[in-house]
Amino acid sequence: MALLTAAPSVASADDVGELRVETYVLPVGAAKPSLEALKNGEGMARLRQLAAAAESQAQMPLETAGPAASYAQLSTQASGTPLPSSPGERTRAASAAGPRATAPEPARKMSFEECKKGLGSDKKFFVKSRFAVCNGASFVQIWTRNNRPVGESGFNLRVIGTIARNSRTITFAYHFSDFVKGGSNAAGALSITTKGNIPKSWPSGARYTRGGDLPAGARTFAQLKAQSTFTQTVLAKAGQGTGSSDLLFAVYEPSVKYTAPAPWKLNGDGGNLFMLAPRWDAAKYLANSTGGGNPDKRGAATFSYITPLTLSGKQGAEERAEALHIRQAFLVPQDTKPYMSAKKVPGQTAKDPLHRTVSSSRNDKNRAAAVKQCKRYWGANYASGGKQCDEYPFASTYEGAAEVEYDSEAKKFNFSVKPIPGPENEAGGNILKSFYAKNRIIDGMDDGFIVKIVT
């Protein structure tokens, strides 16, 4: 936020004219007009346009899954994400864990610098993993006399949400930074109240236990600058959700409200950051389903975002043949079997993800439908030489090869099969299974994932 750094002066009650404070919320990296530009009128028009555009833009990440995805407009821009681990790093991690391939452990911590870098100058959200996310905004105040700008102030707020392994408690770290002021203002005495609101839960009526040191009351601009970091914890006990997996979805929205110091009057009362989407479950097929004997602690929290499964097609990768098969299905689907002229397999974008099924019968039907096509195109001996029939979408998804048997609107043959070496097919299967477990991917349409291939 590029604000003028001229020496500030505090307006007093003796100043002539009406004193007002106009407030705006901008993306954290937005370039704000200088005070001189604001004074000439064109800058104010530009500032209002920036604020209006930010307000009209999406409030939820593009990758949001579950009921929270329909609560507010989704972004058209992908959230910031870390670079995928190199195949060598994942292979070394897998070797350390045992002889079989495995998915990497998802990140559960995030520093302020990581959040700042991840958001950059144009991102509303940074999703390091389903257990470490952040968002941010710039809060701007324009101090006016008789409707003409005479001063400015502002700060940035970034909120980082993290979840420890097998925990139902989410920790939100509030980081205030980049405090600036210029011209004639009373910013030091501006009163600021910060809250972490949960405006919606599914099911409604869920109760949360709050903790941490996020101030319950107001702090001044000067006080927040002196102590700039706070935390709030949010715990949802088990037993409040729906279905056998005890699913509880919510929207978490950090909020900033102002009270202007006399004699200044306020136009606008602050604003909200973009929303985050936490989720709690106690699925029996995921870790900590018993809570170690404590029913309230069953299951764990995650953020309800579509996340990528990364597979490597590089030389030496254990799952290389499977990864290259999927890459072919993504890039040249017309060359895959079974043939279908309009084939476009899902799982490539957050708008068209894959969905896990834990149904053994559906999994078996998907496998049978895939094997049928392997035999059709490569003959009954397709498995000679130790090969196996690899299918994409995976048999453990609703979009598997037998999808048309369950959904009359599904496209027939919108999948790909190919005989590949058995060890590479099994490695891909092990990575997928561990990915499900480590990322708490639940059964059904309220969750999802995509596939990224590195080559």
Image (cartoon, rainbow, N blue to C red):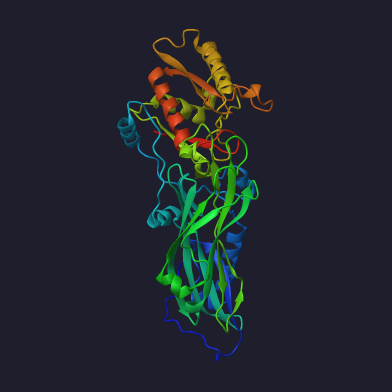
Q: Residue furthest front?
A: 293
Q: Residue at x 64, y 23 (%)?
A: 404
Q: Residue at x 43, y 18 (%)?
A: 420
Q: Residue furthest right?
A: 408
Q: Can residue 50 be seen?
A: yes
Q: Residue furthest bottom?
A: 14
Q: Position of residue 86 (x, y in %)?
A: 35, 38
- Seen from the viewer's position, the closer of residues 40 and 207 is 207
- Seen from the viewer's position, the closer of residues 278 and 83 is 278
Decide: is 111 above or below 36.
above
Q: Residue at x 58, y 60 (%)?
A: 54
- Seen from the viewer's position, the closer of residues 147 and 271 is 271
Q: Position of residue 293 (x, y in %)?
A: 48, 38
Q: Position of residue 378 (x, y in %)?
A: 49, 11
Q: Can residue 324 be seen?
A: no
Quadrant in which the C terminus is drawn:
top left
